[in-house]
């Protein structure tokens, strides 16, 4: 007997007791255990992929766009030769106007994400 395999003694068995593995044996493999996705799994995956956009990220993007517009206005006003106080007042007025205006229409895809 070798590692618990084979005969305890080859006497009377008609063999010499040599143990070898059966090469012709086909082990059950992964092909038999295929896990197909059910309708519930597909619906769950679909709902996860189509979730609503994060409002905090959208607000941050809107504020960033407003600040870019304010910086551009500031450059234009400074190139026109206005004083720092006048530029600062006009930019602040423009910024408050844009903030109170609500949402700036940014290009979005069908899921509401910014392009």
Image: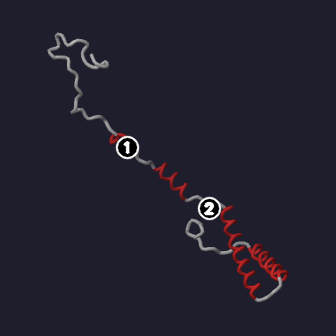
> Of all residues shown, which one is farthest toward the bottom?
80
Q: Quadrant of the N terminus?
A: top left
- Residue for point 84% across, 83% down: 86
In this rendered view, identify the residue nearer to me: 2 or 93. Answer: 2
Q: Quadrant of the C terminus?
A: bottom right
Residue 2: quarter of image = top left
**Residue at (73% x, 72% y) in the render:** 102
Q: Position of residue 66 (x, y in %)?
A: 71, 74
Residue marked by disc 1: 34
Relative to 13, say whether 94 is above or below.
below
- In this picture, residue 75 sits left or right of residue 5: right
Q: Nearer the viewer, residue 43 or 90?
A: 90
Say which residue label 2 marks: 53
Q: Residue furthest top?
A: 11
Seen in the picture, residue 51 relative to 38 is either above or below; the reply is below
Is 2 drawn above or below residue 90 in the view shown?
A: above
Looking at the image, residue 56 lies above or below residue 17: below
Tell me where residue 30 appears, x and y as whole percent.
35, 40
Q: Residue at x 63, y 74 (%)?
A: 106
Residue 50 x %, y %: 55, 59
The residue sitting at 37% across, 40% down in the picture is 33
For the residue labelled by badge 2, is the local secondary structure a helix, a strand or a loop?
Answer: loop
């Amino acid at each position: 007997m070798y590692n618990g395999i084979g005969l305890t003694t080859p006497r009377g068995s008609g063999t010499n007791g040599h143990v070898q593995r059966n090469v012709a044996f086909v082990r059950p493999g992964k092909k038999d255990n295929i896990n197909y996705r059910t309708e519930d799994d597909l619906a769950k995956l679909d709902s996860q992929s189509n979730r609503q956009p994060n409002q905090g990220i959208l607000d941050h993007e809107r504020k960033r766009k407003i600040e870019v517009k304010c910086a551009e206005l500031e450059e234009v006003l400074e190139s026109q030769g206005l004083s720092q106080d006048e530029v600062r007042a006009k930019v602040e007025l423009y910024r408050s106007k844009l903030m109170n205006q609500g949402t700036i229409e940014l290009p979005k895809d069908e899921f509401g994400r910014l392009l």
